[in-house]
Image (cartoon, rainbow, N blue to C red):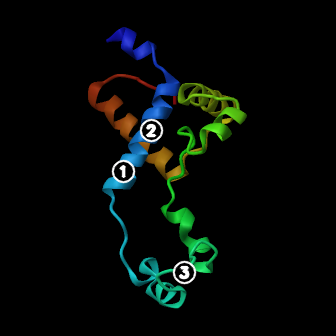
Amino acid sequence: MLAQGITFDYAQLLIDNEIARMIKEVVGGITVNSNDLALEVIQSVGAAGEYVSHEHTYTHFRDLASQNKLIYRGTRDAWQHAGSKDITTRAYEEAKEVFDNFKVKALPEDVVKKMRSIVNEAEEHYNVKLSTE
């Protein structure tokens, strides 16, 4: 158990996160409403029409397209031209990017106060001093 806690693969964490996000996206289902159905667009363009250049498609296609960072969705030629990096290589590069550029956001003051009160209560209850504040 100790070894598991100190040997952690950050690239695998990022890969697992992307897979979990994709699963969540799939099991979340598809929104069905008048805007997403775009029946007026279907009626105006017609069954044999071209929808790709339609304003509605352009406005909404990113809402439905999976936004993967690690899984390459391009052609094999494009993948080879981009350096033939497999998912593990891209995941390690992304992990390094996160480590190099991550900035910790300060917690809101009310959250800090609530956490402090919980620690103070625990210290008093157990008659111990856990913190330096």
On the question of residue 91 being in view, the answer is: yes
Q: Is residue 20 left or right of residue 90?
A: left
**Residue lying farthest to the front in this orientation:** 48
| Mark toward the start of the polypeptide (1 vs 3) | 1
Q: Residue at x 36, y 50 (%)?
A: 24
Residue 47 x/y as whole percent: 46, 82
On the question of residue 116 being in view, the answer is: no
Disc 3 + disc 2, Cβ < 8 Å: no
**From the image, which quarter does the N terminus lie in?**
top left
The mark lying in front, picked from 1 and 3, is 3
Q: Residue at x 35, y 29 (%)?
A: 123
Q: State the mark number for residue 55.
A: none
Q: Secondary structure at mark 2?
A: helix
Q: Secondary structure at mark 3?
A: loop
Q: Secondary structure at mark 1?
A: helix
Q: State the mark number for residue 24.
A: 1
| Mark toward the start of the polypeptide (1 vs 2) | 2
> According to the image, label 3 marks what residue?
49
Is 18 above or below relative to 3?
A: below
Is 106 above or below relative to 48?
A: above
Amino acid on which the number 3 mark rests in the picture = Gly
* Foreground residue among 59 and 133: 59
* Foreground residue among 75 and 32: 75
Q: State the mark number for residue 17.
A: 2
